[in-house]
Amino acid sequence: MVTIKEIARITGVSTATVSNVLNGKSGAAGKEKTREIIDIANSMQYMPNTLAKNLQKKKTNTIGIITEDLTVFNAPEIVDGIDAYCEENSFEIILGNMRLYKRYNNDFTDTPKHHELTDMMIRSMIAKQVEGIIYVGYHCREINYLPSQVQIPLVYAYCYPGKDIYPSVIFDDEKAAKDVTELLIAKGHKNIGVICGPAASYHTKARLKGFNSAMTKHGIKIKNDIIMYGDWDRISGYRMAARLLDKKVSAIFSFNDMMACGVYEQAAERGLQIGKDISLFGFDNRSISQGYVPALSTVQPPLNEIGRRCAEIILNNINQSKKYSKIIYLPCTILERRSVDVVND
Amino acid sequence: MVTIKEIARITGVSTATVSNVLNGKSGAAGKEKTREIIDIANSMQYMPNTLAKNLQKKKTNTIGIITEDLTVFNAPEIVDGIDAYCEENSFEIILGNMRLYKRYNNDFTDTPKHHELTDMMIRSMIAKQVEGIIYVGYHCREINYLPSQVQIPLVYAYCYPGKDIYPSVIFDDEKAAKDVTELLIAKGHKNIGVICGPAASYHTKARLKGFNSAMTKHGIKIKNDIIMYGDWDRISGYRMAARLLDKKVSAIFSFNDMMACGVYEQAAERGLQIGKDISLFGFDNRSISQGYVPALSTVQPPLNEIGRRCAEIILNNINQSKKYSKIIYLPCTILERRSVDVVND
DNA sequence: CTGAAAGCGCTAACAG
DNA sequence: CTGTTAGCGCTTTCAG
């Protein structure tokens, strides 16, 4: 690796001059010398050592991203958004992936082991002199384990801290669910079944709230026996759909696309056509949901935008002394496809 | 940020001693001093500056990953595999995402602009002193633009260089397609329609080769009019399925799950049942393919394993002088689900 | 306009 | 067992 020192020796000037010239400081050297230095640098494929540069400048223009699990469907798009914003603002990213799914098996986020891992990753990033950290959750929830020794801006994406110390960006589950419900109501559906995720899930609670408020607003009584709880997996959608269809609902709002999948299966077995005999809405807009027959209506969370906003907040918090620290709710997009129709009595 | 110097001042020893103690060099200081230094460091939350450390050691234990597009379905899993292997071997990763899809629109990988971007990313990583680079393609193909000035090990994942200069890890398209075809043949299918991707695609060519070899091996004549070319998208699957079904094929092998999606649609419209009237195989094992009704049989590419192998090769190439530089083909897993059945005459 | 000198935070000889 | 010294590659005063 050729260094500034080497170039200085060859061109017969000081390292300072080489540095200045290469950094475009006008008048750092005479016209001819300037040319010569640049030419030599190019021909030797000189490349500044970022480590040395950053060490000296005490500034890395880098933020760290910690993903709970990069292979979860929402993560790449969020990271992509962060990356895009950073690039536009001349910042770089360092990625740390916890790989929670493969590392442990299931519920792990509130164990000492996980806290230790979190601390380790944060420490390691701080050691690398990142100027801020974005923590990307694998599903939305309240994070109660807040690492202590973080002296740099920290932002949560797709999850939020229990206390108001750090900012976070999530999407508006409640509003989206309300919108979906109203759309269904507008189509004449009154007997709407719901397949939630686990009762304790933030998503479940927020979406249920939205559902309830829409129903109430339109004066429709909610029977308790049409609210089912699944586990986000296809099979549970299949099972809950059975119960719901027994109850003759005219529409089903599944809180994710996976479970909606199971509804298709259940309906097929009963000879019922989705989008005709029964309307169906999902949530997440998984890439293939559009390919179901008929295409699944669903809710698209603003993943890329979550990333961008997080990055924006982090960069602002890095540059300003007053830190922003609230929860930001971004709106979702409702995608109506062939799986819903007006009620058919 | 507290430094070694600060701790040295407080404890009244030299920075060298603090460094030695903190790095666990036995006998770096007396028992008591050792304790004191460690205690002070802990209480002040001392954290070594990785930049300074790496600069001095001229070793970063870091490799760079360049993804053509992190949001493409295969990328996160490959990155995950690389990350896992690196973690097990005390290496860190730096991620650079080209965001090809959003940056340009479609075919872009052989434009000067893209070459420039590639060079820039590689230069930037080398500047950060990574010890090796893994380039993750967004789809498998021959990469003919090979950056020149790369003095460190470079490995391609999910794509391969035209010349034998750098190693690469891809999966065995041909073998997988052959296996699928033989499976179909074993179930009595002779009249098998194929929906390929674009004719120029590596995937198309390799899979077609596997298909042909299986058919030939079993003495089945291949009619040219049952080989259709789509564009990987659902709609094209839908269209090609129409032509194929007109020709009364008993099975369809779609070269990806998306297009298989379209086959479901087309079959539904014609009142044909997948897995009964017509057998269907996809490729990719997209997460939701399992949720089709009936579940789609498909091929699972060894994405995580591709990542792991790339990382393994890179770390080996970093440590050894003899560099490995061939293409490695990893086997896929055939997933037989309800969408295929024995032929039904 | 130019360069000598100092030093970012850390480690690795090597001498005491 | 301990500390001095030198320096990784770079930038940045500041004096000539």
Image (cartoon, coloured by chain):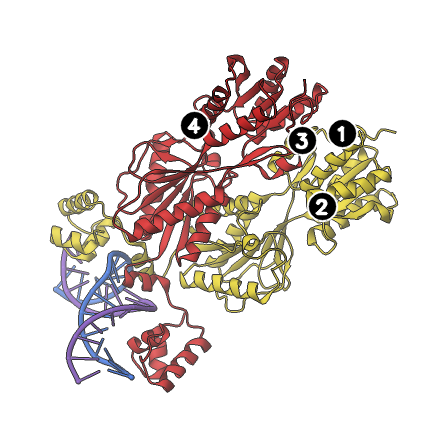
Chain colours: A red, B yellow, C blue, D purple
Q: Looking at numbered disc 1 in the image, what kind of residue is underneath it?
A: Gly
Mark 2 sits on what residue? B175
Mark 1 sits on what residue? B275
Q: Looking at numbered disc 3 in the image, what kind of residue is underneath it?
A: Tyr
**Mark 4 and mark 3: Cα distance apart in space:** 28 Å
- The answer to the question of whether label 3 and label 2 lie on touching residues, with beta carbons closer than 8 A, is no
Numbered disc in front, either 2 or 4: 4
Q: Is residue A164 left or right of residue B291?
A: left
Are dots 2 and 4 on a single chain? Answer: no
Mark 2, residues whose alpha carbon is within 10 Å: few (<14), some, or many (≥20)? many
**Mark 1 and mark 3: Cα distance apart in space:** 11 Å
Mark 1 belongs to chain = B
Q: Is residue A19 above or below residue B144?
A: below
**Mark 3 and mark 2: Cα distance apart in space:** 25 Å
Mark 4, residues whose alpha carbon is within 10 Å: few (<14), some, or many (≥20)? some
Secondary structure beneath label 4:
helix
Name which of mark 3 and mark 2 comes first in the sequence: 2
Name which of mark 1 and mark 3 comes first in the sequence: 1
